Image: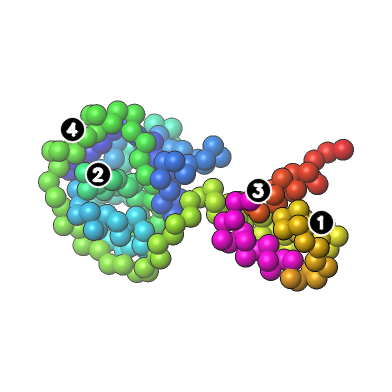
Amino acid sequence: MNYIYDIYANINKKYYDIYDWQKKDKIIHIKKIPIFKIKSSDLQKFIKDEIKLDETFVKSIKNKTEFFNNNLNSNFCAFTDMRDEIITKISNNGNIIGKSSIHFTDRYNATNAFKKINLSNIDYKITKVIPLDSENRYEKIRRNFLMKNIDILSKEKLTYLYFECFEQKVDNEKIIKNHLKKEIVKQNEKVCTTISNFLKLICAPN
């Protein structure tokens, strides 16, 4: 079995690339983890979709991962196609329940280690196809925050905010909310920034 060493992971139900990691995330420091080379088409499915791995494979990697600061007794392994990588946390029945990109402490040595790995044929099935998502993590968090606050603003504040966004006075609360939400979903940067600044202003201490 092949291993990579001294890496960081950010395990979530959904895969986040390193640029999407946030300060509040719980980063784990891995001392040693099994790694398998697979086809690029398979790796992209592992990253995007919900996957169930063969239970025989799961047994082969059970408790093979070691950690620096945690004593996690779960099934972990990494996959690569020599260009991208993913760390997976796997349930005993084979479902991938956690995913992470990899932060290498030494990318050069890791790349050299990859070259020694033979291509593996991993048995798996897709349990759910997840649509491609062009939004990054920050955009989703901001969108949800803005949507939530639009729903709780008073009619007076909504009217003022609408005028700030579109320079039009509208008194119908439903029309205001629907229009603002449509612009948020469309990622209208001018409108989103105006709403964000308005929320900061009304929430600021006197």
Of the numbered discs 4 and 2, the one sitting upstream in the chain is 2
CB atoms of marks 4 and 3 within 8 Å = no
The residue under label 1 is 160
How far apart in space, not on screen, are marks 4 and 3 (Cα)?
A: 45 Å
Q: Height in image: 72 above or below 161?
A: above
Of the numbered discs 2 and 3, the one sitting upstream in the chain is 2
Q: Is residue 100 magenta?
A: no
Indicate the quadrant containing the C terminus: top left, top right, bottom left or bottom right. top right
Of the numbered discs 1 and 3, the one sitting upstream in the chain is 1
Q: Is residue 152 visible?
A: no
How far apart in space, not on screen, are marks 4 and 2 (Cα)?
A: 12 Å
Q: Is residue 32 visible?
A: yes
- Which one is in front in this view, the residue at disc 4 or the one at disc 3? 3
The residue under label 2 is 83
How far apart in space, not on screen, are marks 2 and 1 (Cα)?
A: 50 Å
Type of the residue with mark 4 = Asn
Part of the protein shown in magenta: 176-190
Of the numbered discs 2 and 1, the one sitting upstream in the chain is 2
Look at 41% across and 41% down and name the residue there: 18
The residue under label 4 is 112
